[in-house]
Image: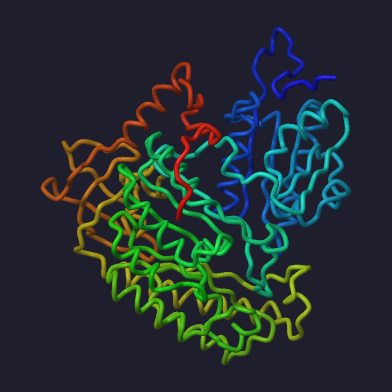
């Protein structure tokens, strides 16, 4: 028997619309990128993205890193139960890291869910939803290893001017606090030619910025035996015409080598920005975390980066309250943060995750102790960030205009963008000057600074607009959203990129 397509909904004459979908994303940039694949698959199967209403198909792309991930998921599933009871044709799917970890638990705790899929079989979602509807029972499919590299799947990009490009999946490290390796598997690397072909396809669609993604991007190439592959990849990105900004996240300090620093400094379109996870400034805690570097190595990397790129903005991740952390250990973290002068830091209170070695360590710290240390760390980092941003006042920066808004932009009539070093910039367009589109570039002075953003209120003579292909793509997306979409786009303006049609190219590093 032939299964119905996902848009073959039971319609009435009063309800002719096609089925709609919504993807709710939790977690890291890898999950955000995976959600673009999920959206692409659903649109390829004939669904439209829901606008302002509860969708016919709701997909949760979950994270398992934080302790409250489970509660957040089941709370949201509980809220949808009444909707599904009233609309029997509605379908709910759960994927991502928490689905990979909990499997049958999800269906036991939320039996109204229609499909559960893991991190290794995103491409199976449309088939699982069809089977669930045809068989009138929930479908569970969790693979233990990758079946198809996600970047070969259709993609619904959320931005016309920027895109994510996955260069690897999985992780070969064994950090004791991290559950990711057990959920995403060992590292798998894409061939360089495939990556460059995807970037070229994004640029052809109007993107001017790409971010290279991997659990440990700088270990890229280990699977095919080229330890210098990541530096070579960065340099190759410099030869792609129309690609103006290249970023990457996240590297690992233990594998971060000088050839990558050289490639960053010598490749004009690689942004002077680096996210380098510290996790702890205590060597004793780093050993307990199985982080195979020490604070002196970490600080040495930052020194060499700034020697080659004096204006580089460096960000980090830090965990407070790892089991056994003493006040002396925590003070070591504060000392390293003071020396590192991070532009921004993502700070986390240690979260005990079942299945990780750290969950069974003795000396788990009381919540009150962790909270007090967390507040001291964030106060220190907020001060440093404000000081580092204040040092930007008077500099001239080129800003890539985004479609995002600051909380006060409506009141101040400012637009928002990102400088080359990824700092957030809110700016005013001088009276009488041309207004940029998302994807265009403006060059302007930094006139004011705060802890988390810069401000520019330029004079007319200080403001320069450079229109770009990305801005043109934005205009096209707006025009298409008002009428019938052209091939390769969706009605809401996002780009639907089908990677299997990419042109062939050499796969040599």
Say whether residue 278 is left or right of residue 312. right
Left-right relation of 216 to 460: right
> Which residue occupies the extreme bottom position in the image?
328
Counting the numbered discs, the total is: 0
Determine the image quadrant of residue 261. bottom left
Of 227 and 154, nearer the camera is 227
Give the residue drawn at x 70%, y 28%.
Answer: 56
Q: Position of residue 139 (x, y in %)?
A: 83, 38
Q: Residue at x 45, y 17 (%)?
A: 483
Residue 312's image quarter? bottom left
* Farthest left residue in view: 461
Which of the pair 242/397 is nearer the observer? 242
Say which quadrant the N terminus sits in: top right
Give the residue displayed 67% in from the left and 68% down from the top. 178
Quarter of the image for residue 77 reads top right
Whether 254 is drawn above or below 507: the answer is: below
Quarter of the image with the C terminus is bottom left
- Would residue 244 be found to the left or right of residue 106 on screen? left
Residue 95 screen position, x and y as percent: 71, 46
Query: How was the colour assigned to the protein in this rendering?
Result: rainbow
Task: Residue 187: give x, y in percent of width and height.
Answer: 62, 60
Residue extending furthest toward the top: 13
Residue 404: x and y, percent?
Answer: 41, 44
């Amino acid at each position: 028997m032939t299964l119905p397509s996902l848009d073959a909904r039971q319609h009435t004459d009063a309800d002719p619309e096609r089925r709609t979908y919504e993807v709710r994303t939790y977690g890291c940039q890898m999950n955000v990128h995976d959600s673009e694949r999920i959206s692409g698959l659903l649109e390829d199967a004939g669904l439209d993205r829901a606008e302002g209403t509860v969708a016919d198909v709701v997909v949760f792309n979950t994270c398992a890193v934080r302790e409250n991930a489970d509660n957040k998921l089941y709370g949201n599933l509980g809220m949808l139960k009444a909707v599904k009871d009233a609309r029997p044709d509605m379908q709910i799917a759960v994927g991502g890291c928490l689905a990979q970890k909990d499997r049958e638990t999800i269906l036991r705790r939320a039996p109204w869910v229609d499909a559960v899929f893991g991190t290794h079989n995103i491409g199976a979602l449309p088939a699982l939803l069809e089977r669930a509807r045809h068989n009138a029972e929930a479908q569970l499919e969790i693979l233990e290893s990758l079946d198809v590299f996600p970047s070969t799947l259709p993609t619904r990009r959320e931005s016309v001017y920027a895109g994510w490009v996955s260069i690897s999946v999985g992780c070969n490290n064994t950090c004791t606090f991290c559950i990711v390796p057990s959920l995403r598997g060992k590292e798998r690397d894409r061939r360089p030619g495939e990556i460059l072909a995807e970037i070229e396809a994004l640029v052809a669609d109007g993107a001017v910025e790409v971010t290279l993604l991997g659990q440990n991007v700088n270990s890229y190439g280990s699977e095919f035996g080229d330890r210098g592959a990541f530096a070579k990849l960065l340099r190759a990105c410099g030869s792609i015409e129309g690609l103006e900004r290249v970023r990457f996240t996240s590297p690992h300090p233990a594998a971060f080598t000088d050839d990558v620093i050289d490639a960053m400094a010598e490749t004009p379109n690689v942004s002077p920005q680096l996210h380098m996870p510290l996790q702890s400034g205590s060597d004793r805690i780093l050993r307990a975390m199985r982080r195979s570097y020490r604070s002196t190595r970490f600080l040495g990397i930052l020194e060499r980066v700034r020697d080659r790129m004096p204006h580089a903005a460096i960000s980090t991740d830090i965990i407070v309250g790892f089991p056994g952390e003493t006040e002396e250990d925590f003070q070591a973290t504060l000392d390293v943060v003071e020396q590192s002068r991070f532009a921004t830091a993502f700070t986390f209170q240690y979260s005990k995750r079942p299945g990780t070695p750290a969950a069974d360590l003795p000396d788990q710290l009381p919540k009150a102790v962790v909270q007090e240390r967390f507040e001291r760390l964030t106060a220190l980092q907020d001060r440093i960030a404000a000081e580092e941003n204040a040092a930007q006042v008077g500099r001239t920066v080129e800003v890539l205009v985004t479609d995002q808004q600051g909380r006060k932009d409506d009141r101040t009539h400012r637009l928002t963008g990102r400088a080359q070093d990824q700092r957030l910039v809110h700016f005013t367009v001088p009276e009488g000057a041309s207004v940029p589109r998302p994807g265009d570039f403006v060059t302007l002075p930094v006139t004011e600074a705060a802890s988390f953003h810069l401000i520019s209120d330029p004079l007319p003579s200080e403001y320069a607009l450079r229109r770009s292909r990305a801005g043109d793509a934005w205009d096209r997306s707006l025009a298409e959203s008002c009428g019938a979409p052209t091939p390769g786009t969706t009605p809401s303006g996002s780009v639907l990129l089908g990677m299997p049609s990419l042109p062939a190219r050499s796969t040599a590093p």
